[in-house]
Amino acid sequence: FNGQNVRHLHDLHKRESSGLVKLREVLEDRLHEIKRAKTWKHERVLTSPQDRKELEQRLSQFHGREDTILYASCFDANAGLFESMLTPEDAVFSDALNHASIIDGIRLCKAQKFRYPHRDLNDGVFSMDGTVAPINGLRELADKYRALLAVDDSHATGFFGETGRGTEEFCVVLGAADIICSTLGKAVGGASGGYTTGPKELVTLLRNVSRPYLFSNSPPPAVVAASLKSLDLVESSSQLRPRLRENTRQFRDGMKAAGLTVAGDDHPICPVMVGEAPMAVELSTGMLKRGIYVVAFSYPVVPKGAARVRVQLSAAHTPDDVTRAVNAFADVAREIGLVKKST
């Protein structure tokens, strides 16, 4: 890279949906903590116990749970959960489309393993499909069979539901999950980090036996500071979530009118379904040529014959951004033969 021929792209594959990452308050808090920790000198500085404890307490209050434990990532939170709490006498039932971190975490434990078809009745929201788990039905089954319900809410925390409290709030069943794993790297704009929140007894167990927690670093000071500031903004903002909902509606309606299929529920993860991998690559390449960054996914990330281009909308997108994206998708889709050209 020589710094020449630089292109500015519209990012339609944002990791965070709330639009908080670019907000001045979050960036200023992050910069302050970087300077305070002197990380530019490459010193090994860990987050102070007071800062971590404050963030854990805030997350517990936000979710209405007894206690929270921080991890370096939500992948670690999921990977460290099942092995810590399940024995060979236990059984775990997992949705067929659960995230790779849940799959790996289940593989590591000694419990009996059962996989059920997607949403057959657990991610709260499924990252490749934009579909929402039926929390109500899962809670009923858990009660019937005296089971614990664990939900990965990474693609819902901070922006889904009326006050951003995720899938439970969206499904009007606050408190339904016994355990929630989520991330600090998306709407709670710390850029990285994850956590598990739930009963105090469980969190105490994880602090003592969860291997990803014991043998990895804590989230760095800048991430903790940015996450605390982001929580403030998530709880106080009255504009970001409505803006995101409107962007989602505008995009989904526009794509439908253009003859394109967008899978999933009313969620800002909008998978544009293509079918075959080569055409998905053509679609994403055509979008890039038009200055819009999206990513194509195909087997083995998604099932064979279900290749797609995943769009993840943000409150930071403007209506003009969304209109431009829809028009570009329509143009490229006609160009590559994904939809018929109008006569």
Image: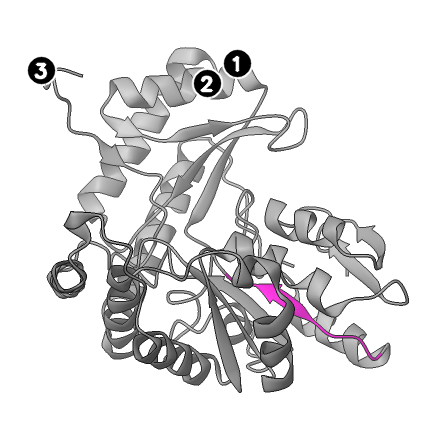
Which tag, 3 or 2, sits closer to the chain's start? 3
For residue 272, side relative to residue 94 (left or right): left
Which residue occupies the extreme right position in the image? 89
The label on residue 278 is 1
Above or below — where is 339 with respect to 216? above
Check if mark 2's residue and mark 1's residue have beta carbons within 8 Å. yes
**Quadrant in the rendering for residue 206:** bottom right
In front: 253, or 85?
85
For the question of whether residue 342 can be seen, the reply is no
Q: Residues within 10 Å of mark 2 (few under 14, many from 20)?
A: some
Which stretch did the figure color magenta? 146-153
Q: Main secondary structure of the magenta part?
A: loop
Check residue 254 for magenta coloring: no
Say what amino acid the circle numbered 3 marks: Gln
Above or below — where is 343 with respect to 232? above
For residue 15, side relative to residue 78 (left or right): left
Q: Label 2: which residue?
A: 281
The secondary element bearing badge 1 is classed as helix
Across and down, in percent, residue 158 comes to 38, 67
Say what amino acid the circle numbered 2 marks: Val
Say what amino acid the circle numbered 1 marks: Pro
Above or below — where is 256 with respect to 177? above
The secondary element bearing badge 3 is classed as loop
For residue 154, side relative to residue 236 (left or right): right
Across and down, in percent, residue 35 comes to 12, 59
> Alpha-carbon distance for marks 1 and 3?
30 Å
In front: 102, or 95?
102
Q: Residue at x 41, y 45 (%)?
A: 252
The secondary element bearing badge 2 is classed as helix
Q: Label 3: which residue?
A: 4
